[in-house]
């Protein structure tokens, strides 16, 4: 199981959007995806409609050190309210399960409990390393709080890859660089305990076709040496498109709302994170959606692009 933790030291840069849409795309490929909402502002918990809401969630998983069925909710894809759904959506047998966040606020019971635990750094990793969990899922994506804290530390330590989103504006770029350096320094201090900082992949979100946006994107890419060579900035950037907001409203992946521009960007994004999928597409890519009356849905542009083979979940 590949574990990706989405981290940031500033809110509003698109962490939850990246986590939810990567999960949706992977499920369309046929993969079994586990989402964990490890944020004290549980946006990911509210992103998708659930077909089953588990009685417990993040707190029980972390405190017990075990991921059991009573902590695992099931995402409904497509939701019954999404009238534009077609047979091409979620056609490969993939699914998304979700560990909901119940740790609202910095003074939540979970945060207080973790502050007194000497092994707080490994609590999420212990739960995920269970053989039954490893065999049940292909990919785990952890959405973290937009600030340094116990939950972010535990999510970093559980990850194989860190995904760090940044927005192309001056304030976000400066805070991103400072925050990443702080994160690296914080976790390199645990090297004596045998821990390592996972590879860090930066994705530039909310890009626009403007001079300012392009200039800031280039500035971020040029900070490789300043970030001590530990951060790779992906070539793919995620455009600022209304389809992402519409998708959140409809509680579906954004590539279903816009199977052209958004789908192109999300496929390219996924290929850089998981190179073995390069050149492969989900069935709905550049397809024609059935028209829907709701504002939350959109009619996609048709394309004569030949559909390519689809990866099956392992």
Image: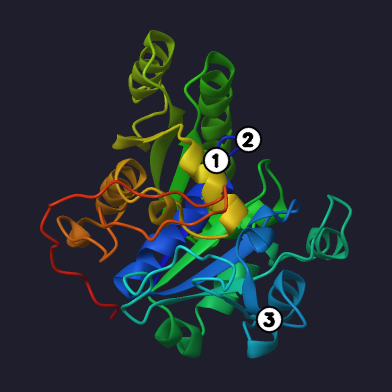
Residue lying at 75% horizontally and 53% vertically, measured from the top left: 40
Q: CA distance from mark 3 to mark 1?
A: 25 Å
Q: In the rendering, at what x and y percent does residue 173 appear?
A: 51, 21
Q: Which mark is residue 14?
A: 1
Q: Is residue 299 above or below residue 276?
A: above
N-terminal label among 3 and 1? 1
Give the mark nearer the N terminus: 3 vs 2: 2
Instruction: Find numbered disc 3 in the image and state the secondary structure of the residue it sits on.
Output: helix
- Measuring from the top left, give residue 243's x and y in whole percent: 47, 43
Query: Is the Cβ of the residue at disc 1 closer than 8 Å to that at disc 2?
Result: yes
Residue 303 or 65: which is nearer the viewer?
303
Local crowd at mark 2 within 10 Å, few (<14), some, or many (≥20)? some
Q: Is residue 117 shown left or right of residue 95? A: right
Mark 3 neighbour density, 10 Å: few (under 14) some (14–19) many (20 or more): many
Name the residue located 47 percent from the left edge and 60 percent from the top edge. 159
Q: Is residue 302 left or right of residue 207?
A: left
Secondary-structure class at tag 2: loop
Helix, strand or loop at label 1? It is loop
Residue that extends furthest to the top in the rendered view of this protein = 211
For marks 1 and 2, give the CA distance: 6 Å
Residue indicated by mark 2: 12
From this viewpoint, is residue 188 visible? no
- Report the residue at 51% width, 57% height from top: 20
Residue that label 3 marks? 71
Calculate the distance from the C-alpha at mark 3 to the C-alpha at mark 2.
27 Å
């Amino acid at each position: 199981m590949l574990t990706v933790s989405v981290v940031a030291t500033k809110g509003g840069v698109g962490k939850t959007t990246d986590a939810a849409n990567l999960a949706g795309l992977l499920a369309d490929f046929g993969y079994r995806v586990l989402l964990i909402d490890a944020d004290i502002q549980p946006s990911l918990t509210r992103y998708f409609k659930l077909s089953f809401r588990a009685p417990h969630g993040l707190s029980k998983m972390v405190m017990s050190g075990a991921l059991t069925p009573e902590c695992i909710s099931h995402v409904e894809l497509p939701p019954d309210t999404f009238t534009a759904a077609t047979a091409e959506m979620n056609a490969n047998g993939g699914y998304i399960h979700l560990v909901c966040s119940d740790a609202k606020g910095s003074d939540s019971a979970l945060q207080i409990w973790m502050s007194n635990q000497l092994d707080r750094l490994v609590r999420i990793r212990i739960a995920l390393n269970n053989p039954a969990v490893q065999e049940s899922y292909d990919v785990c994506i952890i959405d973290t709080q937009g600030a340094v804290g116990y939950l972010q530390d535990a999510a970093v330590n559980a990850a194989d890859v860190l995904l760090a989103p940044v927005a192309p504006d001056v304030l976000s770029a400066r805070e991103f660089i400072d925050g990443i350096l702080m994160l690296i320094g914080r976790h390199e201090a645990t090297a004596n305990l045998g821990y390592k900082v996972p590879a860090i992949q930066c994705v530039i979100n909310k890009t626009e076709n403007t001079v300012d946006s392009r200039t800031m994107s280039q500035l971020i890419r040029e900070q490789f040496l300043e970030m001590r060579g530990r951060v790779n900035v992906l070539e793919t950037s995620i455009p600022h498109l209304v389809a992402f907001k519409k998708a959140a409203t409809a509680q579906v992946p954004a590539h279903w709302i816009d199977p052209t521009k958004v789908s192109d960007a999300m496929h390219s994004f996924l290929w850089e994170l998981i190179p073995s999928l390069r050149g492969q597409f989900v069935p709905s890519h550049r397809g024609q959606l059935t028209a829907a009356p709701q504002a939350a849905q959109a009619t996609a542009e048709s394309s004569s692009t030949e559909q390519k083979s689809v990866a099956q979940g392992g």
